[in-house]
Image (cartoon, grey):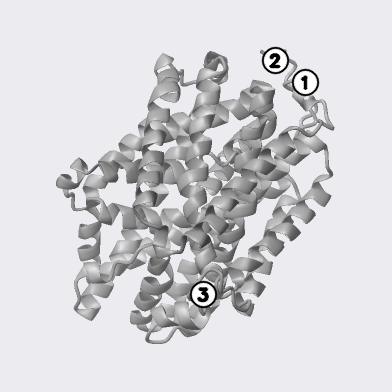
């Protein structure tokens, strides 16, 4: 659907926009990363820094990204060009390392979920899910430079992921992404509620829930707990990706953007909290069923989804296959709703500057995405995934978010954004919001960045060789940064950068 006055794609409804934004924010990390972080960082006590981070960083920065996209009326590159031509590269950089970084390995993980959806029907992992996942399914090599062969089950599932991405994105914002999320988000909620209520009925479930929520307030004195809380909020809301800027630019002028940002942020965090009950109820069941301590059951990140959960599914008896299908279907839906948002953000940027036909562009990007993801389908793919994920999430996104706050807060009249948001929104922002963007957020993000750099200097990440970290991790960041400047200096093929598209003079 295109606006009659601007010719730009628009959402059919505010509900569709909010569901799409939630779909981008809610992903695989909401289901396994949040639960593990809560358990490791003080249980119920972790919710205190988490909610403080949501209020002082997550919501204000999401409001900023909605405001940039809506007021400057464009994708991230176009919006930052309108702020100042010298900042256009900052719009391209996140799009490059998310489109040709995050979405490549993220799609591979979604492919794992699709494979495991089918494995669940026969409990194919047998009595040792750990050995099955690492040795039989992934067949992980000993070094990132030992790439090995392509794993055909992953390759086939990866093709399915990119075909689905293409079908949705090629249809555009309204009939494609909005419609998909109107199906995906209610489906994901139904699946999640079914899994949570089912998990809570299992023997030992309350042991897990108790561990999940029991507060250990002594943890709050550990600065790392607060760093983890702010990091989780930043990552889970898709901040610094350029996605929310693009999505907001598709909204009509008279749209309650501040309220939409708050709804999106609260829905995302609510989903994380809800998923945590299901995850730990099932882990409590495993603890009771096997007669072992809960801490011996809990596993971090990927191990939780592809090792601990399959083990629990096997313990459910005849109900196991159905539970497994529901669980991995929910992961697949959450993953695809996020992957399409990453590709769309890049499509939006290219469309705005180079006026390339959407059908051609979507097809080309999906082919490139599939080809680029092949490295993550190999036997060394998990090691590449681990390194690329570490550097993009811990450095790329943090630096992008930090520069975003500095560019708008210090090198642009931030009151232009705030006054615009107050004009179109019911909830009015005070000057306190300016202070958060100009001072608080740069300080929080700088602390996270310095902490990551300090830990990096203490020892090579994941015990990988420095050659692999530099050759795969740092180079991924560096190449994408270089390409962002290359794209920024290319001449505009449209007049979008000369007007805001809403009939108002750029300020």
Residue 79 or residue 195, whichever sits in front: 79
Mark 2 / mark 1, whichever is N-terminal: 1
Nearer the observer: mark 1 or 3; the answer is 1
Nearer the observer: mark 3 or 2; the answer is 2
- Residue at horizontal 38 percent and vertical 50 percent from the top: 457
Mark 3 / mark 2, whichever is N-terminal: 3
Element at badge 3? helix
- Cβ atoms at labels 1 and 3 below 8 Å apart: no
Q: Which residue does the numbered mark 3 point to in the structure image?
A: 116
Tell whether 141 sits left or right of 6: left
In the figure, residue 369 lies in which quadrant?
bottom right
- Cβ atoms at labels 2 and 1 below 8 Å apart: yes
Element at badge 1? helix
Element at badge 2? loop
Q: On screen, 166 above or below 55? A: below
**Residue 371 at what x, y percent from top left?**
71, 64
**Residue 158 at what x, y percent from top left?**
64, 68
**Residue 394 at what x, y percent from top left?**
45, 47
């Amino acid at each position: 659907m295109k606006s009659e006055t601007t010719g730009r794609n628009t959402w059919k409804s505010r509900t569709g926009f909010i569901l799409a934004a939630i779909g981008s924010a809610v992903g695989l990390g909401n289901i396994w990363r949040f639960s593990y972080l809560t358990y490791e960082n003080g249980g119920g006590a972790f919710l205190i820094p988490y909610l403080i981070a949501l209020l002082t960083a997550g919501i204000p920065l999401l409001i900023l990204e909605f405001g940039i996209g809506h007021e400057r009326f464009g994708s991230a590159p176009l919006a930052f060009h309108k702020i100042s031509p010298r900042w256009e590269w900052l719009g391209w950089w996140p799009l490059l390392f998310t489109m040709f970084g995050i979405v490549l390995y993220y799609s591979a993980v979604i492919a794992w979920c699709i494979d495991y959806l089918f494995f669940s029907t026969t409990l194919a992992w047998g009595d040792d899910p750990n050995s099955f996942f690492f040795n039989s399914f992934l067949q992980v090599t000993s070094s990132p430079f030992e790439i090995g062969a392509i794993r055909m089950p992953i390759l086939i599932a990866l093709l399915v992921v990119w075909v689905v991405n293409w079908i949705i994105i090629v249809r555009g914002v309204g009939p494609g992404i909005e419609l998909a999320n109107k199906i995906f988000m209610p489906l994901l909620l139904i699946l999640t509620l079914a899994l949570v209520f089912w998990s809570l009925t299992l023997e030992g479930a309350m042991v897990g829930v108790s561990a999940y929520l029991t507060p250990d307030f002594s943890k709050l004195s550990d600065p790392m707990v607060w760093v983890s809380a702010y990091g989780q909020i930043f990552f889970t809301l898709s901040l610094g990706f350029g996605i929310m800027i693009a999505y907001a630019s598709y909204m009509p002028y008279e749209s309650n953007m501040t309220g939409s940002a708050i709804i999106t942020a609260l829905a995302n965090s609510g989903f994380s909290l809800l998923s945590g009950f299901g995850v730990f109820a099932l882990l409590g069941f495993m603890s009771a069923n096997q007669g072992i301590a809960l801490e011996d059951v809990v596993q971090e990140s990927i191990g939780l989804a592809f090792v601990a959960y399959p083990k629990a599914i096997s313990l459910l008896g005849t109900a196991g296959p159905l539970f497994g299908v529901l669980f991995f279907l929910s992961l697949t839906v959450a993953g695809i709703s996020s992957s399409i948002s990453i590709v769309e953000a890049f499509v939006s940027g290219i469309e705005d500057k180079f006026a390339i036909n959407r059908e051609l562009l979507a097809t080309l990007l999906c082919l490139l995405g599939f080809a680029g993801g092949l490295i993550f389908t190999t036997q060394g793919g998990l090691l590449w995934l681990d390194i690329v994920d570490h550097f993009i999430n811990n450095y790329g996104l943090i630096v992008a978010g930090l520069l975003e706050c500095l560019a708008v807060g210090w090198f642009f009249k931030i009151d232009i954004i705030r006054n615009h948001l107050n004009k179109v929104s019911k909830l009015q922002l005070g000057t306190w919001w300016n202070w958060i963007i100009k001072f608080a957020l740069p300080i929080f993000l700088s602390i996270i960045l310095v902490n990551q750099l300090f830990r990096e200097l203490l020892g090579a990440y994941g015990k990988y060789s420095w050659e692999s970290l530099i050759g795969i991790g740092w180079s991924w960041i560096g190449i994408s940064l270089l390409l962002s400047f290359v794209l920024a200096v290319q001449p505009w093929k449209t007049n979008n950068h000369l007007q805001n598209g809403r009939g108002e003079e750029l300020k």
